[in-house]
Image (cartoon, grey):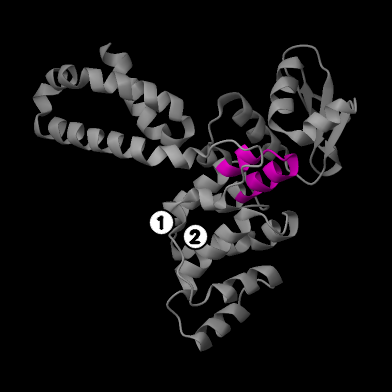
Amino acid sequence: MSKSNSKQTIAVNGEQLYTIYVGKAFSECFSVDKDLETLLRAASPFFAAKFHEQKRLIKLPTFDPQDFRSYKDWLHTRRASPHRQADFIESRCENEWGHICQAYVLGERLQDYSYCNVMVDVLAKKSSTASDQSVKDILACVENVFTRTARTSPIRNLLIDTVYSRIFSTLPDAECMTRLEALPMVPQFTAGLFMRKGKSIKPQWSDPCQYHRHDRGEPCFADTEPSIWKDMRAMFHDWCSFICTNAKGISDSYQAFRPCVSSTYTVLKKLGTKCTAAFSWCRALVKAHL
């Protein structure tokens, strides 16, 4: 990394073809070589259009450099790392919900809806264990999301549904109105909560695809995941139960389950971000015994 004119430049291996300036006063710039250009063209219609126009300098002044750095990492690995990325967030987004929402906003700006869908999946999963503090964190993100996304953006419905199911679903009308008055003054968010009253809402994590965008006609991962994950979960449960009750026979138990583990490893590798923890565990076992 080098500094020039008090701006940070992030170098990328290879010949520099474009430069992306990110942040207030364009505080950080990213060099784009041929490899990164190829990834950006394929994933983002926004960048594809800029490259087609031969614009050598591309500006993203309303995003934090860490937002783009995280996106660039995702392009290379296809793995979302909200816990690690959240360590970089300061006053702008002090909570993990805020960072993931900000990542979604960037994805929508770049028109990379695969990235948006991944962030929605992370949020939907987090909503299953949302606490009172989580709801406060969500409310802190509302204005940013509703002022920087399209009116039809699915993440808006996800935030509305999560807050409604955690606060308003069981409250009488009078108390709902009192609670609504205390919320951030974002008309579409407040109206969305009010319109949910009396409606049955599926748990957000039960069908993440309801908050997805598939503008390119690609199949949704959520359509194929449940049956695969159900089989793997049952296998892991049986295997762990066996090992826990036969601590001294781990090596023997592994040999018995070896074919299943090897095939599961292959499936997990394909699933990628959906089963990161299980994949890491399975990979460690495979490397240790094969």
Q: Is residue 209 visible?
A: yes
Badge 2 local density, few (<14 within 10 Å), some, or many (20+)?
A: some
Residue shown at 74% from the left, 44% from the top: 109
Q: Compared with residue 248, is residue 200 higher up or lower down, i.e. above or below?
A: below
Q: Give the residue at x 85% y 33%.
A: 58
In the image, residue 234 lies at what x, y percent?
24, 38
Circle 2 — which element? helix
In this image, 19 relative to 278: left or right?
right
Mark 1 burial class by Cα count in 10 Å: few <14, some 14-19, many 20+:
few
In three-dimensional space, the C-alpha distance between marks 2 and 1, rounded to whole angstroms, equals 9 Å
Identify the residue at image location x=42%, y=33%: 276
Q: Residue beneath label 1, please?
A: 129
Give me the residue at 56% from left, 25% from top.
77
**Magenta span covers which residues?**
101-117
Residue 116 coordinates in the image, percent (x, y): 62, 43
Query: In the rendered image of this protein, does residue 201 appear above or below residue 220?
Result: below
For the residue pair 285 and 197, the one nearer the viewer reads as 197
Which residue bears the numbered disc 2? 134
Q: Is the residue under label 1 in contact with that under label 2 (CB below 8 Å)?
A: yes
Secondary structure found at label 1: loop
Rendering quarter of residue 8: top right
